[in-house]
Amino acid sequence: MINLKKTILLVSILTISIALFQTACNKDPTKVEEKPIVSTTGEAIIGKIGGTISVGDVTSTVYGASIEIPKDALVDNVKIEIVPGTEEYFIDGVAVQTVSFLPKGLEFKDLVEIGIPWSTDDQTISNSSVYYLDTENSLVQELPIERVDIEKKMTYVLINHFSTFFNARQVLSIDYGLMKANNELVGYCNLYTPISQILPKMIDSPYANAEEIVLNNDGLQDCFVMVQFDLFKKDNTQQYYSFHVARQDFYIKYHHSADGWEAIVYRYDNPLIASNQLIEVYHKTGLTTEDFFSDWLSGFPILASFNENCFSGNNYPIQNVDHFHLWANWSLVKNINPIGSSQSWTWRHGGSTRYNFSLSDVSENTDDSNNNNIDDFYEDSNNSPYTPSNPLPANNATNVTITSDLSWECSDPEGDAISYKIYFGTNANPALAGTAQDVTTFTPVGLVKNTTYYWYIEATDSEGLSTTGPIWSFITEAGSASTGCDGITTVEYAGQTYHTVEIGDQCWLKENLNVGTMINGTTDQTDNNTIEKYCYENDVQNCTQYGGLYQWDEMMQYVSNEGAKGICPSGWHLPSSNEWKTLEGTVDSQYGVGDPVWDNADWRGFDAGKKLKASSGWGLNGNGTDSFGFTMLPAGYWSDGGLFSDKGIGGFTWNSSASVRSFAFNNDGIMNSFKPKKNGYSVRCLRD
């Protein structure tokens, strides 16, 4: 019996061992779990597992360009390359750097993300766009942005096939999208940019812009405005929207006579279908030159109703579960050739919507989209203002006087009232400096000689739609007031750039301090390890323009010794009253340093105040001469109880001796007086 049990046990052990051996034999000992490829050389072989490729060579003209390919986006192994593009596209006569992804035309089963580096110095997060470039078909299509990396100066988009791309500031102001009418999808395309600002396709064209092309080709059979709409549906077998289902083209023919301009709109429902014909849908005569150029060639939407004749195959009627995206583009062409490629006077500019629109997602359009009633104002919709243009001082101007105003041009397609935000400063991405309503001028305060300034305009119509213009710059006139101190012209402190000025033996900051966190004017500043400030009328843009307002204890950081650092940057301190007397005696034409007049209270001196006040920005004819570049601003003050007073007519600054220097619009001297320490005044710093 015992031997039988041993036999059974041995058989069981043997059976288990054989099973384990077979399992081990069935495993492939050479197989290693695959991981996505990561390459920084700009090329790699990628397969089903996916991977990431980037250009890590800092000397490359496409440094930073990248692609992230998800798992199963590719079926087979493919050598992927990121290289500088050979195709050319010009902005303001300068070729932008293009990026090509190879092999060209490679399609993916899922959307892939590419990153394209910014190509010009005037780009910002608000004006950078990625474009698909097809030189063979004269096509420049703006792509929907997924994300932006400001530090790397990169913009990322999703694509479904390889081509050439570039990243630049917005080429044209053009809008496009999807809506619906009578349970049909309607595409719209609206060019806001005046055609006088649209460049010809060829850099050596005999015509400077599209308006010249129109005027020089008036009445010719082969000159049309073309607006093309293509509708794509999600391919349920894949993740991206590659299935072309419908197309509708519009051509605007024009002619000029003694009776004015004549315009005829033709519609072509899917010219790829042989049985479809070109149809005249609208005819307008007696148009003025202004109406023709500002309304018909740009400024009014073209609507494409995707009716049954536009769809190919069995794609009509559409279902609520179907998802679509739209491609739309505008161009000036030499001929009607819908099936082939029309010869273009200009690039075909346009863009693509995002990838998730169903019939139930889009809003209802109540206009006569089938007849494309182009001269309707579409009362239930609204267009953004045109892009601000024609800046003065002109972009990149030099030797600009420090008393110059800013001006620009801007209008609205519907004639709506426009309000403006003016962004201005010495940083390349300037902060908000002021606002204007229905006027296109702005007076900056405290301009400094030999300094580069940057500015741009954000225009908002009465319906709340906004358009942001490009960033412009200019350099002010040369002068000794901007030479700084011992060659040090600027100081970076808490995210702000301050300029220096040497007056006599002293080195001052030219600007009032603007450091700390704004608090409401109804509360006191406190000793809480956070620098706090008041902004005039609780408006942060007043801090940007005039600096912050500080109570004496907050300025001193709760110490009481003269010459304390307080809230000044390292290497700088809060001037004492005696150091202010030195400044006053240095600049005054009649009373020098050490004169007893500076020991007086109240208003003192002959013209020290006038010489230290800014040469612009003071109201009631109170500007100074800013003879030494000190640029004292009329920042006003805050009084205990939350009252703000005297902005534009009075400037007040603390010193570490607990007195206040006051400047006024109607006095050329400077007052020295003691005021409540709870009041909030401006602060200047003096180098140690």
Image (cartoon, rainbow, N blue to C red):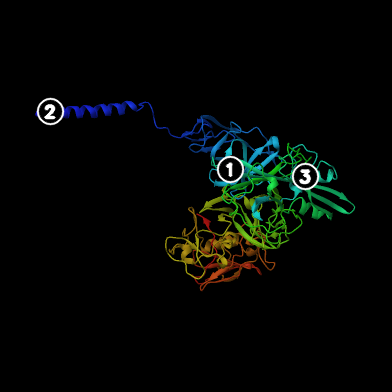
Q: Which marked residue is nearer to the observer: mark 2 or mark 1?
A: 2
Q: Which mark is residue 241?
A: 1
What is the CA distance from the residue labelled 1 to the residue labelled 3? 28 Å
Image check: 48 left or right of 311?
Answer: left
* Of 145 and 231, the residue lying toward us: 231
Farthest residue toward the right? 258
The amino acid type found where label 1 is placed reads Tyr
What is the CA distance from the residue labelled 2 to the residue labelled 1? 71 Å
Q: Which residue is mark 2?
A: 4
Q: In the picture, residue 603 is in which quadrant?
A: bottom right
Q: Which mark is residue 278?
A: 3
The amino acid type found where label 3 is placed reads Leu
Q: Are marks 2 and 1 in contact (CB under 8 Å)?
A: no
- Vertical comparison of 648 with 250: above or below: below
Observer able to see residue 34: yes
Q: In the picture, residue 237 is in which quadrant?
A: top right
Identified at 50% across, 33% down, the residue is 40
Location of residue 483 in the rendering, given as x and y in whole percent from the top left corner: 61, 49
Q: Secondary structure at mark 2?
A: helix
Q: Are marks 2 and 3 in contact (CB under 8 Å)?
A: no
